[in-house]
Image: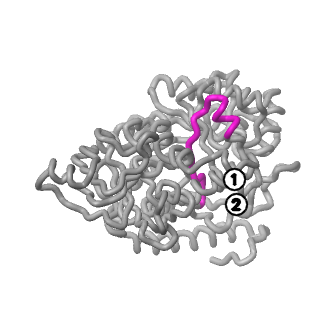
């Protein structure tokens, strides 16, 4: 039994979002009680007592769209966005380095470390060949959805390039086999802390046959599916060229849309497509930071009104979910031209309860008796939180990843008093720096004619 007492509990529950002078008791992997400090302390004896004064205890954050390996390109690819007007090719830009299995593990450790430090407790990682690093990622203590990503488009074409579609059935079958193998090896692992999903790269990277095969596999396994959807204008043109319709309607006609699908981005989209997603009750993952970088924004209000549940994700290069929450709030207000249209409690719900529910963990994302003990302790004693009149709002408006001092997943501390317990932080950072230098130097040597961004150095 662990009891955090004399604290502020941000429950994330609508009818009682904040409880002051409160205590929360954790037993096993669940929350045993939340109430007034005196009442909880009188009810339980013999547990470990943690003084929560100066802290807010709140649900851990759910990052519903992430590519951990791509932290390698932090500071580089943020300024290499896909074009919003023809021609859509990005071939003159610095390519992402090809990595060995060991190098991929190093970058995943780095991304996971940053995620933990920033209060993320649930994360969906989307990549190919996740088996290369699944054990490393599971060992961080995070709650995970591992989404094995595939395509059956012939190699040599990037997402968002409006060129003819050539199918590679063998590539598609290899992707399906990888999805099945990852599911068999990891779904339900670590006491149920790890789940596996099926991921299609994007509509312009998938034939109708491949979409049908992945959907059938998803139904047979009973797992989630995810896809990058209406991400780029080049993707829209590519799908129209190959299929005669925009991406979301292409997926609808292929039978791929469902209430067990998480569609990321949904930026370059018609009203008819928004309605189709809502009718299918598809979850939409809003990635505001990545969207702002590329100058494209989803119409979140229209998608939510159509019937989509909204969740949040960092996408790539960063694991800062506080930046994501704040950008989601501000960009939606700016896009709508209405400062009253989105409130902090809504964005916080997107980042917690909605994310947990969408990723298949409905008992998490709020702090309530019987719920999952996935929570964080946030230092709210700093000047940027004072005077602390409305802490559930300041979490979104002024909260910082560096405020997180302790992180618990499934009743186990994975960070305590500012120290990450599941990885050697200094070693992870040193190793990642060396991997990055080596990988980028190798890529530059292989691409001597490619110009590098200002200030880039290995």
Judged by depth in the image, the label closer to the viewer, 1 or 2, is 1
Which residue is at 77% across, 54% downward? 295
Badge 2 density bin: few <14, some 14–19, many ≥20, Cα 10 Å = some
Q: Is residue 290 left or right of residue 127?
A: right
Please state the horizontal and vertical placement of residue 386, each as a whole percent of the image: 48, 69
Q: Is residue 125 left or right of residue 27?
A: right
In the rendering, which numbered label is found on residue 182? none
Among all residues in the image, which is located at the extreme left? 46
Please state the horizontal and vertical placement of residue 67, each as a whole percent of the image: 56, 52
What residue is pinned by disc 2? Answer: 95
CA separation in Å, label 1 and label 2: 29 Å
Q: Is residue 394 left or right of residue 56?
A: right
Residue placed most toward the observer, 42 or 45? 42
Please state the horizontal and vertical placement of residue 311, each as a whole percent of the image: 56, 42
Q: Are the residues flagged by discs 1 and 2 in contact, CB closer than 8 Å?
A: no
Which residue is at 65% across, 68% downward? 75
Up-down relation of residue 52 to residue 187 (above or below): below
Give residue 263's quadrant in the image: top right
What residue is pinned by disc 1? Answer: 331
Quarter of the image for the C terminus: give it. bottom right
The answer to whether residue 102 is visible is no
State which region is magenta: 301-317
Badge 1 density bin: few <14, some 14–19, many ≥20, Cα 10 Å = some
Residue placed most toward the observer, 211 or 337? 337
The tag earlier along the polypeptide, 1 or 2, is 2
Residue placed most toward the observer, 227 or 24? 24
Q: Is residue 62 left or right of residue 54?
A: right
């Amino acid at each position: 039994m662990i009891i955090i007492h004399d604290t502020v509990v941000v429950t994330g529950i609508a009818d009682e979002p904040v409880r002051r002078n409160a205590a929360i008791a954790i037993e096993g992997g669940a929350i045993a009680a939340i109430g007034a400090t005196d009442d909880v302390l009188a009810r339980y004896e013999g547990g470990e007592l943690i003084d929560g004064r100066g802290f807010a205890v709140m649900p851990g954050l759910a990052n519903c769209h992430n590519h951990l390996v791509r932290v390698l390109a932090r500071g580089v690819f943020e300024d290499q966005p896909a074009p919003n007007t023809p021609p859509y090719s990005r071939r003159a830009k610095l390519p992402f380095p090809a990595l060995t299995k060991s190098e991929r593990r190093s970058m995943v450790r780095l991304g996971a470390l940053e995620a933990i430090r920033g209060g993320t407790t649930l994360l969906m990682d989307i990549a190919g060949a996740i088996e290369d690093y699944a054990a490393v990622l599971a060992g961080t203590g995070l709650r995970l959805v591992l989404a094995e990503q595939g395509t059956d488009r012939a190699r040599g074409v990037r997402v968002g390039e409006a060129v003819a579609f050539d199918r590679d059935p063998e590539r598609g079958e290899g992707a399906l086999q990888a999805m099945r193998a990852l599911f068999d090896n990891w779904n339900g692992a670590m006491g149920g802390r790890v789940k596996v999903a099926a991921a299609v790269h994007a509509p312009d990277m998938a034939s109708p046959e491949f979409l049908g095969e992945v959907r059938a596999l998803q139904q047979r396994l009973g797992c989630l599916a995810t896809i990058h959807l209406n991400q780029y204008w080049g993707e829209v043109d590519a799908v129209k060229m190959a299929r005669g319709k925009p991406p979301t309607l292409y997926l609808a006609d292929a039978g791929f849309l469902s209430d067990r699908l998480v569609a990321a981005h949904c930026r370059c989209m018609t009203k008819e497509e928004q309605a189709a997603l809502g009718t299918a009750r598809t979850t939409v993952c809003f990635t505001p930071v990545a969207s702002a970088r590329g100058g494209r924004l989803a119409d979140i209000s229209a998608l939510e009104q159509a019937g989509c549940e909204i969740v949040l994700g960092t996408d790539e290069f960063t694991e800062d979910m506080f930046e994501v929450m704040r950008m989601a709030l501000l960009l939606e207000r700016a896009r709508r031209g209405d400062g009253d249209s989105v409130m902090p409690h809504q964005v916080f719900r997107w980042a917690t309860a909605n994310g947990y529910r969408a990723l298949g963990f409905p008992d998490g994302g709020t702090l309530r008796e019987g719920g999952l003990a996935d929570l964080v302790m946030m230092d709210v004693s700093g000047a940027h939180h004072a005077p602390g009149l409305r802490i559930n709002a300041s979490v979104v408006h002024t909260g910082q990843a560096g405020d997180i001092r302790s992180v618990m997943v499934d009743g186990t501390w994975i960070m305590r008093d500012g120290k990450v317990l599941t990885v050697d932080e200094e070693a992870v950072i040193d190793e990642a720096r060396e991997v990055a230098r080596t990988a980028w130097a190798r890529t530059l040597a292989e691409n001597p004619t490619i110009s590098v961004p200002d200030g880039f150095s290995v």
